[in-house]
Image (tube, rainbow, N blue to C red):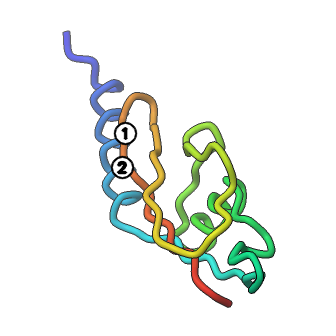
């Protein structure tokens, strides 16, 4: 017997995976000159909010892997897990 609901769910997850891995979230922050650290580190919630605003993609906090907030400029690849389907989210943190 074919489980059409499961097939549709897998297709939806693969589509979301492809969309997430093809975009880059841009976040701008100010820098503390003496320490070369960001004034306000970038948290998981900041990234999820920017992803939603910039690309209309919804993620739950437990789907994005970020152990500690990002406190420096740069390009980052953060792991994303969508019910057993893994991908990466590209995050670019630049100067405001």
Query: In the drawing, does residue 3 fall left or right of residue 29?
Result: left
Q: Which residue matches tag 1? A: 86
Residue at position x 36%, y 35% in the image: 85
Query: What x and y, as percent, mark residue 6?
Result: 33, 24
Identify which residue, 15 or 68, lies in the foreground.
68
Residue 4: name its quadrant. Answer: top left
User: Answer yes or no: do the residues labelled 1 and 2 have beta carbons within 8 Å?
Assistant: yes
Identify which residue, 57 or 48, lies in the foreground.
48
Query: What x and y, as percent, mark residue 71?
Result: 68, 65
Q: Secondary structure at mark 1?
A: strand
Query: What x and y, as percent, mark residue 55?
Result: 51, 70
Whether residue 33 is situated above or below residue 46 in the rendered picture: below
Residue at position x 58%, y 82% in the image: 94
Q: Quadrant of the C terminus?
A: bottom right
Residue at position x 33%, y 65% in the image: 22
Residue 29 - label: none
Q: Secondary structure at mark 2?
A: helix
Whether residue 61 is situated above or below residue 3 in the rendered picture: below
User: Callout 1: 10 Å neighbours few (<14), some, many (20+)?
Assistant: some
Residue at position x 19%, y 9% in the image: 1
Query: In the drawing, does residue 46 fall left or right of residue 58?
Result: right
Identify which residue, 11 or 26, lies in the foreground.
26
Q: Which residue matches tag 2? A: 17
Identify which residue, 52 or 2, lies in the foreground.
52
């Amino acid at each position: 017997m074919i489980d059409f609901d499961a097939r549709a769910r897998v297709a939806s997850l693969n589509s979301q995976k492809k969309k997430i891995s093809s975009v880059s979230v841009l976040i701008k922050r100010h820098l503390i000159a003496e320490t070369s650290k960001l004034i306000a580190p970038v948290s998981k919630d900041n990234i999820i909010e920017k992803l939603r605003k910039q690309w209309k993609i919804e993620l739950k906090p437990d789907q994005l892997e970020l152990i500690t907030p990002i406190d420096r400029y740069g390009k980052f690849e953060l792991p994303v897990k969508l019910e057993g389907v893994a991908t990466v989210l590209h995050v670019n943190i630049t100067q405001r």
